[in-house]
Each structure stands twice: as structure tokens, then as C-alpha cells.
Amino acid sequence: MTFKYTETGPQGLLSGKRAFVLTARGGIYAGGTQDHQEPYLRQALAFVGIHDVSFIHAEGLNLGGDFLEKGLNQAKAQLAQAI
């Protein structure tokens, strides 16, 4: 069970947990107004009580060349720091 309904509304039951979300994206969206994925996932995880969320995005993968290499290398470096 991940949540329950109380007299004051839903309560997440996974508090104290940490989540890592790894994404692969064709474009570059992190921190921009077109990034709908990260805010949505933060809200969904918060609903079940997980507020400590780290995102690692491999971005620019569909842009080819230097963007592809840079996106993968940055994601690998962030992942190495996280574990």
C-alpha cells in the first residue's frame, strides 16, 4: 500500500524513502518550461510520500553528434556521484 485516505485527505505511506529517476530524452528540457515530465513525477511521488527525489537526465540524445555524447557523459557522471 502506498497511500491511505484520512479525515484530512490522502496520506502517503512511503515517507522517509528516496527515489532516483533516470530518464533518456531526445531533446533538452531540464529546467525549462517544456519539462512536463519532472514536475509530474515529483507530484506523483509526493502523493505516495516520497519527497526526496533525484533526477538524472540523459538529454539531447536525438540531436546527435556532440549533444548525444555530452548528454550521455553528464548522465553517467551524475549517476556515479549518486551511488
Image (tube, grey):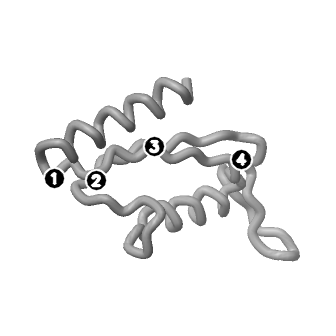
Give the Cα separation between the discs numbered 3 and 1.
17 Å
The percent position of residue 9, horizontal first and vertical second, equals 79, 74
Q: Vertical placement of 62 versus 39: above or below?
A: above
Question: Is 65 or 25 nearer to us in this picture?
Answer: 65
Report the residue marked by disc 2: 25
- In the image, what residue type sits under mark 4? Leu
Quarter of the figure with residue 8: bottom right
Give the Cα separation between the discs numbered 4 and 2.
28 Å
At 18% from the left and 42% from the top, the residue drawn is 66
Report the residue marked by disc 4: 14
Give the Cα separation between the discs numbered 1 and 4.
35 Å
- In the image, what residue type sits under mark 2? Arg
Count residues near mark 1 (Cα–Cα under 10 Å), then give few for <14, some for 14-19, many for 20+.
Answer: few
Q: Nearer the viewer, mark 4 or mark 2?
A: 2
* Label annotation for residue 16: none
Label located before the other in sequence (1 or 4): 4
Label located before the other in sequence (2 or 3): 2
- In the image, what residue type sits under mark 1? Asn
Report the residue marked by disc 3: 56
